[in-house]
Image (cartoon, coloured by chain):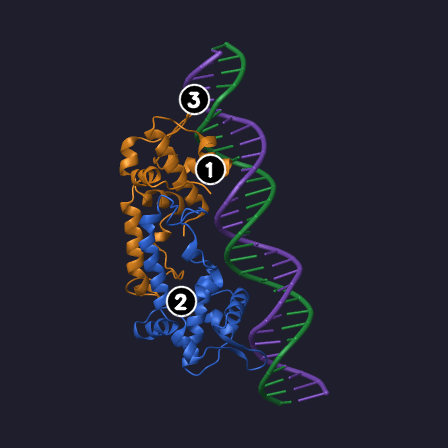
Chain colours: A blue, B orange, C purple, D green
Amino acid sequence: MFSKACEYAIKATIFTAKQALEGKRTNVKEIAEGIDSPEAFTAKILQILVKHQIILSQKGAGGGFDMQAEKIQNTSLIEIVLAVDGDAIINRCVLGLKQCSGANPCPFHEKYAPVRMKLVASLKETTIADLVAGLTTRMAILKE
Amino acid sequence: MFSKACEYAIKATIFTAKQALEGKRTNVKEIAEGIDSPEAFTAKILQILVKHQIILSQKGAGGGFDMQAEKIQNTSLIEIVLAVDGDAIINRCVLGLKQCSGANPCPFHEKYAPVRMKLVASLKETTIADLVAGLTTRMAILKE
DNA sequence: AAAATATAAGACTTTTTTATCCGATTTAAA
DNA sequence: TTTAAATCGGATAAAAAAGTCTTATATTTT
């Protein structure tokens, strides 16, 4: 459903948020270890997140990545997905047809429409704070 | 969501079924034109569909592809997806975690579970006949 | 001011997916 | 029986996605 880059982006954001909530700034190496991702590739993805102002970066010694409490609370999953994978998940026809729409539907359009609505709704209503909370209270995982 | 190969597979099956319901056997060239797909690649995908007994093939002059009325009625979308893309859509963690499950959930697991159920249900309950019917009665499209 | 540390940016490589090509095989028609 | 039409199967090629490497830039610490 998501690209590998997007999966890493989501996990990296959760990891960074969790560290931030514990008052710690983190860095590429820690993140890559924490989410079991390739370090250099993860660095690329973190740049996308910074550019979209989802996380904060600080260059230089003692620098790294951080996330503000307000952002953790107000950023929803959909924003990460849009930043990394674009709006295909919202707009692209599942059969890949350019002209598919409510007025000119592909054969699966009507059956899929409510599923897509549910999916997008769940991405919109799930915040990074929700995901971090799930992490601690339900022993959810970020690697393996 | 689906691979390009899977998108072609679905469209090719719908096209073949529609021709079959009109009493016509079709062939790779017609299918590729009808669904606007690359011919050689489409041929590859048709072989997968034949191997999984979703459509029928007949070699030699006047040969081509066909689909039995019973198959059109009883084959659901999920069977094509499983044949071409495997069971990732049913089983794979959206964050790509190997160990993710109800007992050991990734942070998005619980929020996504009902969406996945809806999605899989819609793939299971939608038959090729449904899709062909939608094609004619609602002017849905297979190309562009 | 210099050294050390960390992100930023771009070029490059590898892997996977998508797509093409060609020869072999099968079958129907001439 | 020959020829033409069609799928089948394997090798190859191109494009996209995933991943690496190197250099530049910024910032803190010493």
Task: Point out the tag, 3 or 1, that comes first from the N-terminus.
Answer: 1
State the residue at coordinates (45%, 41%). B143
Q: Quadrant of residue B116?
A: bottom left
Q: Chain of mark 3?
A: B
- Name which residue lies at 37% across and 66% down: A124
- Estimate the spatial distance between the alpha carbons at disc 1 and disc 2, rounded to whole Å: 36 Å
Question: In which chain is the residue bearing label 1?
Answer: B
Asked whether the residues under marks 3 and 1 belong to the same chain, the reply is yes
Q: Which mark is residue A82?
A: none
Residue shown at 42%/36% (left/top)? B46
Amino acid carrying label 3: it is Gly
Residue to which mark 2 is pinned: A77
Q: Secondary structure at mark 2?
A: helix
The residue at which mark 1 appears reads as B42
Mark yes or no: residue A40 visible: yes
Picture quarter containing residue A123? Answer: bottom left
In the picture, the quarter occupied by the C terminus of chain A is bottom left
What residue is disc 3 on? Answer: B62
